[in-house]
Image (cartoon, rainbow, N blue to C red):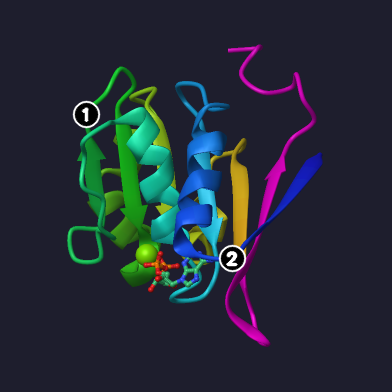
Amino acid sequence: MTTEKILTRDPAETEAAGVAFAKTLVPGDFVALFGEIGAGKTAFVRGAVSYLSPGTRVQSPTYTIVNEYPGKIPVFHFDMYRISDDDSLYGIGFDDYLERRGICFAEWSENIGPWLPEDYISVYIEKDAAHPDMRTIRIRRNAAGSRKESL
Ligand SMILES: Nc1ncnc2c1ncn2[C@@H]1O[C@H](COP(=O)(O)OP(=O)(O)O)[C@@H](O)[C@H]1O
Ligand SMILES: [Mg+2]
Protein backbone atom coordinates (compact mmCIF):
# COMPACT_ATOMS: atom_id res chain seq x y z
CA MET A 1 0.00 0.00 0.00
CA THR A 2 1.31 3.46 -0.87
CA THR A 3 -0.20 6.76 0.20
CA GLU A 4 0.51 10.07 -1.45
CA LYS A 5 -0.50 13.27 0.35
CA ILE A 6 -1.10 16.53 -1.48
CA LEU A 7 -2.08 19.88 0.02
CA THR A 8 -3.97 22.36 -2.18
CA ARG A 9 -4.83 26.01 -1.57
CA ASP A 10 -7.50 26.63 -4.21
CA PRO A 11 -9.66 24.73 -6.72
CA ALA A 12 -7.09 25.19 -9.50
CA GLU A 13 -4.49 23.34 -7.44
CA THR A 14 -6.94 20.52 -6.80
CA GLU A 15 -7.64 20.31 -10.55
CA ALA A 16 -3.89 20.27 -11.20
CA ALA A 17 -3.55 17.39 -8.74
CA GLY A 18 -6.26 15.63 -10.75
CA VAL A 19 -4.30 16.14 -13.98
CA ALA A 20 -1.11 14.69 -12.49
CA PHE A 21 -3.07 11.76 -11.07
CA ALA A 22 -4.79 11.05 -14.39
CA LYS A 23 -1.40 10.54 -16.04
CA THR A 24 -0.82 7.50 -13.82
CA LEU A 25 -4.08 5.74 -14.75
CA VAL A 26 -4.53 2.76 -17.04
CA PRO A 27 -7.67 1.23 -18.60
CA GLY A 28 -9.70 -0.66 -16.04
CA ASP A 29 -8.70 1.56 -13.10
CA PHE A 30 -11.43 2.36 -10.60
CA VAL A 31 -11.00 5.55 -8.59
CA ALA A 32 -13.09 5.71 -5.40
CA LEU A 33 -13.46 9.27 -4.11
CA PHE A 34 -14.34 10.00 -0.48
CA GLY A 35 -15.08 13.27 1.23
CA GLU A 36 -17.92 15.49 2.37
CA ILE A 37 -19.96 17.78 0.17
CA GLY A 38 -17.82 20.64 -1.14
CA ALA A 39 -14.58 18.79 -0.41
CA GLY A 40 -13.47 19.06 -4.01
CA LYS A 41 -14.21 15.61 -5.44
CA THR A 42 -15.72 17.04 -8.61
CA ALA A 43 -12.87 19.57 -8.92
CA PHE A 44 -10.35 16.73 -8.76
CA VAL A 45 -12.26 14.68 -11.35
CA ARG A 46 -12.57 17.78 -13.53
CA GLY A 47 -8.79 18.06 -13.61
CA ALA A 48 -8.36 14.37 -14.37
CA VAL A 49 -10.93 14.47 -17.16
CA SER A 50 -9.31 17.56 -18.72
CA TYR A 51 -6.37 15.24 -19.41
CA LEU A 52 -8.29 12.06 -20.30
CA SER A 53 -11.09 13.67 -22.33
CA PRO A 54 -9.97 17.15 -23.40
CA GLY A 55 -12.74 19.65 -24.05
CA THR A 56 -15.31 17.82 -21.95
CA ARG A 57 -17.38 19.77 -19.45
CA VAL A 58 -17.52 17.99 -16.10
CA GLN A 59 -20.30 18.38 -13.57
CA SER A 60 -21.35 16.07 -10.78
CA PRO A 61 -23.77 13.52 -12.26
CA THR A 62 -26.04 14.06 -9.28
CA TYR A 63 -29.29 13.27 -11.08
CA THR A 64 -28.09 10.93 -13.82
CA ILE A 65 -25.77 9.01 -11.41
CA VAL A 66 -23.28 8.42 -14.23
CA ASN A 67 -21.74 10.51 -17.00
CA GLU A 68 -19.67 9.05 -19.80
CA TYR A 69 -16.87 11.09 -21.38
CA PRO A 70 -15.24 10.21 -24.69
CA GLY A 71 -11.51 9.74 -25.13
CA LYS A 72 -8.81 7.26 -26.05
CA ILE A 73 -9.95 5.49 -22.92
CA PRO A 74 -13.64 5.93 -22.05
CA VAL A 75 -14.24 7.67 -18.73
CA PHE A 76 -17.22 6.95 -16.47
CA HIS A 77 -18.00 9.47 -13.75
CA PHE A 78 -20.39 8.30 -11.02
CA ASP A 79 -22.02 10.23 -8.23
CA MET A 80 -23.13 7.64 -5.67
CA TYR A 81 -24.83 10.19 -3.42
CA ARG A 82 -28.26 8.69 -4.03
CA ILE A 83 -27.15 5.08 -4.09
CA SER A 84 -28.03 3.19 -0.95
CA ASP A 85 -28.54 -0.43 -1.92
CA ASP A 86 -27.46 -2.91 -4.55
CA ASP A 87 -30.75 -2.54 -6.47
CA SER A 88 -30.10 1.13 -7.13
CA LEU A 89 -26.48 0.43 -8.03
CA TYR A 90 -27.06 -2.47 -10.38
CA GLY A 91 -30.09 -0.63 -11.77
CA ILE A 92 -27.69 1.81 -13.44
CA GLY A 93 -25.72 -1.07 -14.94
CA PHE A 94 -22.76 -0.70 -12.59
CA ASP A 95 -21.21 -4.06 -13.42
CA ASP A 96 -21.49 -3.40 -17.17
CA TYR A 97 -19.45 -0.22 -16.73
CA LEU A 98 -16.83 -2.12 -14.77
CA GLU A 99 -16.41 -4.56 -17.64
CA ARG A 100 -15.82 -1.90 -20.28
CA ARG A 101 -12.12 -1.37 -19.48
CA GLY A 102 -12.52 2.36 -19.12
CA ILE A 103 -11.53 4.49 -16.16
CA CYS A 104 -14.18 4.92 -13.47
CA PHE A 105 -14.39 7.79 -10.99
CA ALA A 106 -16.94 7.33 -8.21
CA GLU A 107 -17.84 10.28 -5.98
CA TRP A 108 -19.45 9.31 -2.64
CA SER A 109 -17.80 5.91 -2.62
CA GLU A 110 -18.74 5.82 1.09
CA ASN A 111 -22.12 4.67 -0.19
CA ILE A 112 -20.88 1.69 -2.18
CA GLY A 113 -18.38 0.18 0.25
CA PRO A 114 -19.72 -3.38 -0.13
CA TRP A 115 -19.77 -3.18 -3.94
CA LEU A 116 -16.42 -1.59 -4.68
CA PRO A 117 -14.35 -3.70 -7.06
CA GLU A 118 -11.64 -5.82 -5.51
CA ASP A 119 -8.88 -3.50 -6.72
CA TYR A 120 -9.35 0.26 -6.63
CA ILE A 121 -7.49 3.50 -5.94
CA SER A 122 -8.82 5.62 -3.07
CA VAL A 123 -8.81 9.40 -3.15
CA TYR A 124 -9.74 11.01 0.16
CA ILE A 125 -10.27 14.77 0.21
CA GLU A 126 -10.54 16.68 3.47
CA LYS A 127 -11.35 20.28 4.22
CA ASP A 128 -9.32 22.21 6.76
CA ALA A 129 -11.42 23.73 9.54
CA ALA A 130 -9.05 26.69 9.97
CA HIS A 131 -8.46 27.49 6.28
CA PRO A 132 -11.57 27.45 4.05
CA ASP A 133 -9.66 26.97 0.79
CA MET A 134 -7.16 24.37 1.99
CA ARG A 135 -7.65 20.72 1.13
CA THR A 136 -5.71 17.59 1.98
CA ILE A 137 -5.85 14.94 -0.74
CA ARG A 138 -4.70 11.42 0.07
CA ILE A 139 -4.27 8.93 -2.74
CA ARG A 140 -3.99 5.33 -1.64
CA ARG A 141 -3.00 2.47 -3.94
CA ASN A 142 -2.11 -1.16 -3.59
CA ALA A 143 1.59 -1.98 -3.60
CA ALA A 144 3.12 -1.06 -6.97
CA GLY A 145 3.17 -3.93 -9.39
CA SER A 146 0.24 -5.86 -8.01
CA ARG A 147 -2.15 -3.83 -10.11
CA LYS A 148 -3.40 -5.01 -13.50
CA GLU A 149 -0.27 -6.95 -14.50
CA SER A 150 -2.04 -10.18 -13.78
CA LEU A 151 -4.97 -9.33 -16.05
N1 LIG B 1 -8.43 23.80 -2.48
C1 LIG B 1 -9.66 23.61 -3.02
N2 LIG B 1 -9.88 22.54 -3.81
C2 LIG B 1 -11.09 22.29 -4.33
N3 LIG B 1 -12.18 23.06 -4.14
C3 LIG B 1 -12.04 24.15 -3.37
C4 LIG B 1 -10.78 24.48 -2.79
N4 LIG B 1 -10.94 25.62 -2.08
C5 LIG B 1 -12.21 25.99 -2.22
N5 LIG B 1 -12.89 25.11 -2.99
C6 LIG B 1 -14.33 25.19 -3.31
O1 LIG B 1 -14.95 24.02 -2.78
C7 LIG B 1 -15.96 23.56 -3.66
C8 LIG B 1 -15.65 22.16 -4.14
O2 LIG B 1 -16.74 21.73 -4.88
P1 LIG B 1 -16.82 20.32 -5.59
O3 LIG B 1 -15.57 20.04 -6.33
O4 LIG B 1 -18.10 20.28 -6.33
O5 LIG B 1 -16.88 19.36 -4.28
P2 LIG B 1 -17.57 17.93 -4.12
O6 LIG B 1 -17.66 17.28 -5.46
O7 LIG B 1 -16.63 17.21 -3.17
O8 LIG B 1 -18.91 18.16 -3.47
C9 LIG B 1 -16.03 24.55 -4.82
O9 LIG B 1 -17.02 25.51 -4.51
C10 LIG B 1 -14.65 25.17 -4.80
O10 LIG B 1 -14.63 26.48 -5.31
MG1 LIG C 1 -19.27 16.39 -6.50
Q: Looking at the image, which is closer to me, 27 or 44?
A: 44
Query: Which residue is situated farthest in the top direction here?
Result: 150
Q: Residues within 10 Å of mark 1 (few under 14, many from 20)?
A: some
The percent position of residue 142, horizontal first and vertical second, equals 74, 35
The stretch of residues the image draws in magenta is: 126-151
Please determine whether, in this image, residue 70 is positioned above or below residue 72: below
Residue beneath the point at 51% across and 75% down: 36
Which is nearer the eye, 30 or 118? 30
Tell me which amino acid carries mark 2.
Answer: Arg
Sequence-earlier tag: 1 or 2: 2
Q: Which residue lies at the image location 30% right of the left edge and 27% below the top edge?
A: 74
Labels 1 and 2 touching (C-beta < 8 A)? no
Which residue corresponds to the image point at 53% horizontal and 54% vertical from the top-left?
13
Residue that badge 1 annotates: 70
Q: Camera-side residue: 92 or 48?
A: 48
Callout 1: CB less than 8 Å from ligand 2:
no
x, y percentage for residue 108? 46, 64
Horizontal and vertical percent for residue 2?
80, 39
